[in-house]
Image (spheres, rainbow, N blue to C red):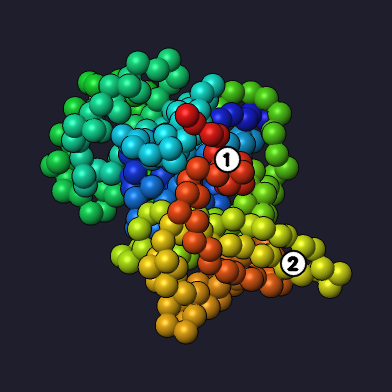
Amino acid sequence: MTQKCGFVAIVGAPNAGKSTLVNALVGQKVAIVSPKAQTTRTRMMGVAMEGESQIMLVDTPGIFAPRRRLDRAMVAAAWNGAQDADLIAFVLDAKTGLNAKIAELVKTLAERREPKLLILNKVDITAKESLLDLAMQLQEALNPEAIFMISASTGDGVADLKQALAERMPEGPWHFPEDQVSDATDRMLAAEVTREQIYLQLHAELPYASAVETEKYEERKDGSVAIHQQILVARDTQKAIVLGKRGARLKEIGTKAREEISNLLGRKVHLFLHVKVSEKWEEDRGLYREIGLDWVE
């Protein structure tokens, strides 16, 4: 049979469930997920296989009105992720529905030349009547090739969507080995897992302004890996939150992150974390390179 391979840009507003969907399509975790909006910061790719089709899923940051340099870099990464895609998959939180910001995003997407699929996510918690109204409104505004109603978290409708994506991939050789699930380096993946744990454990307490930088990544002779990371926050009060009483919170973050990194890499991991206050970490060009973002003036 002929191999097929193509790029699908997964775009949408923050918290639409894009990363959860990418993980569901790949069949394992390749993108971090948290209840906090704007969790995804950089363009990261998941690789899904369906029959003879290799589907390269570009998980992009949510598109929103940017205010800071980091915001601008994230939104630029989202639109860059859609450049030259074979297909744009627009993911919408069906429960939230249409608002002014999403309507503006739909208008921008409608002007793009790439073929589009509309994916209404979280249908398991959305009233059926509003779903049909939403689908009709967006059919007219976006003119997608097809509309899919799914729940990325439960898996409902994901198999049909994956089949549809596979059918739409152009003929061509696979870009990755059949067993590769992401283009992220182990170093980047490790930093993302730690950042996910910070969000999961502190999302109600710690503001959005934090970052994780992998300072050292050392292969050891026994096959294990030693990873040294620093958690960057803007203020001393934030450092105290991450550390917790007598360092208990940082230890818990480290324990959970180490377990998950070890599972993802399939090897023993030694994880060393420290917290650094850097008021202007968002102005550090080197950090942008580390986390995979372009510097945006």
Instruction: Please tell me in which quadrant of the rendered image residue 206 appears.
Output: bottom left
- 51 or 4, which lies in front? 4
Task: Tell me if 250 is positioned left or right of 235 in this view.
Answer: right
**SS type, badge 2:** strand
From this view, report whether residue 46 is shown above or below residue 103: below
From this view, report whether residue 182 is shown above or below residue 251: above
Q: Where is residue 197 in the image (x, y as percent from the top left)?
A: 47, 65
Q: Residues within 10 Å of mark 2 (few under 14, many from 20)?
A: some
Q: Quadrant of the N terminus?
A: top right
- 179 or 243, which lies in front? 243
Q: Nearer the observer, disc 1 or disc 2?
A: 1
Instruction: Please tell me in which quadrant of the rendered image residue 192 appears.
Output: bottom right
Q: Residues within 10 Å of mark 1 (few under 14, many from 20)?
A: few
* Distance of label 1 from label 2 (alpha carbons): 27 Å
Task: Tell me if 96 is positioned left or right of 193 in this view.
Answer: left
Q: What residue is disc 2 on? A: 225
From this view, report whether residue 255 is shown above or below residue 207: below
Q: Position of residue 184 (x, y in %)?
A: 63, 47
Q: What residue is disc 1 on? A: 285
